[in-house]
Amino acid sequence: MQQTPGTPPPAARMDAGWAQAAQKQIAQEQRALTVDRACDIVGALPEFPQAKTLLDVGGGPGMIAIGLTQRHPTLQGVVFDLPQTAAVAQANIIAVGLHQRLSTASGDFAAQPFAVDYADIIWCSSFLHFVEDITTSIAQLFNALTPGGVLVAVHAEIASNQEDAASVLPFYLPLMLRGRRVTREGELASLLCDAGFSRVETRRYQPFPMSPLTVLIARK
């Protein structure tokens, strides 16, 4: 389909929509529940006290990276997202005075998911629903970790049990109908193992704002 002159390309339109959401509902959801859940999960990792670097992939308004950095006095991090969305995160980082330890990076998810220095901990929430090639993106997550680093991947999965699937599908079926990927139960863990991650721990049905999500903790 030919693009109408003066119409922003699809990636730019998507970025603008995510940036608007990051300023409002996503920021509200992260503040209300997700930050505390993320800090509980990451803070309980035995690697967290010694961690030096954090990467928040698809971090939106950056509240999770901010919360984790506030709880770790020497942690430095990067929030990666689309350009306009990353600008929202940067404004939030500056507002809380963490710009000396937190920064942002941006890019096109389809073309180049991220290009940052190695991280000891990667928080990756819902990002893999939106990538074009999930296998390539998981490989890039693996490569971005330091040896001994930890990936925390938080995504919706469709359970094999109909009752459990019903708690997720109302929120994620529209995403699937738009061609985005929501893995079946156990599929993402298998993909992580195939990419070289070890000791993949699965925590199903964790409470998050929209619906129960699966938390996968994988080590390099």
Image (cartoon, rainbow, N blue to C red):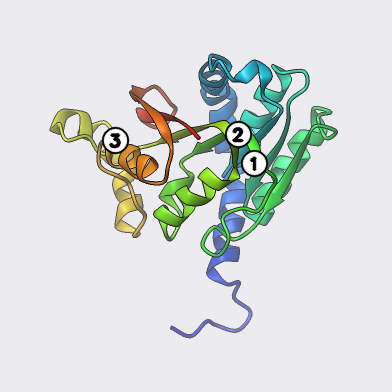
Instruction: Identify the residue shown where x is 52% and y is 38%.
Output: 124
For label 3, the crowd category at 10 Å Cα-Cα, with few meaning under 14, some 14 to 19 and many 20 or more, is some
Front residue of this view, candidates 60 and 193: 193
Q: Secondary structure at mark 1?
A: helix
The answer to the question of whether label 1 and label 2 lie on touching residues, with beta carbons closer than 8 A, is yes
Res. 214 image quadrant: top left
Q: Is residue 98 above or below residue 88?
A: above
Q: Picture coordinates of residue 22 (x, y %)? A: 61, 42
Res 27 label: 2
- Toward the viewer: 101 or 32? 101
Which residue, given by chain and number where applicable, does mark 3 sit on? 168
Q: Amino acid at mark 2?
A: Ala
User: Which numbered disc flags the more N-terminal residue, 1 or 3?
Assistant: 1
Q: Is residue 60 left or right of residue 126?
A: right
Taking the view exactly as shown, the residue that stands out farthest to the left is: 162
- What residue is drawn where x is 25% and y is 36%? 185
164 sits to left or right of 111: left
Q: Which residue is mark 1?
A: 23
Residue flagged by tag 1: what amino acid is it?
Gln
Q: Secondary structure at mark 3?
A: loop
